[in-house]
Image (cartoon, helix red, strand yellow):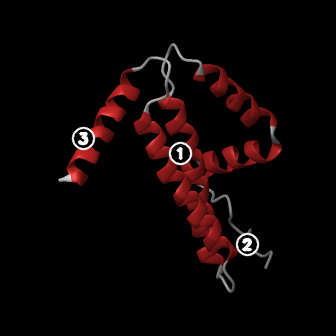
Amino acid sequence: MRSGRWRDDRHQETRWLNDRPDVMKLLALQQAKIRLSRARKAVTALKLRPISFADAQEAWVDFLLAANSVYFKLQRGVKKKSANKTWLKGVEDLRETDELLRYIHHARNSEEHGIERSGEIPAGSQ
């Protein structure tokens, strides 16, 4: 009985947060946390020893997609008339100026939209 009450309270809290124009949508935060967890798992897989090149490449692509998804989930969660717009602008500026974040963004774009893999070893270089 108590657990049902807790779920009802949590649902009301979620509805309240999602209905407020000055707060990021809670659903977006929840989804971003899931994607962040996936990105962390991919990083953990990259740290494993020994790891084959194929496994490393797969983990790298998993990381690129999950990390990019975190940003987009949060971006979609910012409501139009929100103080979070200022926060989002700061994140967008950081993505444009930070070399590592730019590299990750371009590597993800290459992986998603290009035909060459971002982690591919060129033929004859082994």
Q: CA distance from mark 2 to mark 1?
A: 31 Å
Q: Name the side, left or right, on which 59 lies relative to 96.
A: left
Residue under the point 49% across and 16% down: 80
Image spot of residue 84 (x, y percent): 59, 23
Q: CA distance from mark 3 to mark 2?
A: 58 Å
Q: Name the side, left or right, on which 16 lies relative to 99.
A: left
Image spot of residue 57 (x, y percent): 63, 69
Question: How many callouts does the rendering have?
Answer: 3
N-terminal label among 3 and 2: 3
Q: Amino acid at mark 3?
A: Asp
Label 1 neighbour load within 10 Å: few <14, some 14-19, many 20+ = some
Q: Are marks 2 and 1 in contact (CB under 8 Å)?
A: no
Q: Amino acid at mark 1?
A: Ser
Q: In this figure, which residue is indicated by the disc labeled 1?
A: 69
Name the element at disc 1. Answer: helix
- Of badges 1 and 3, the one in the foreground is 3
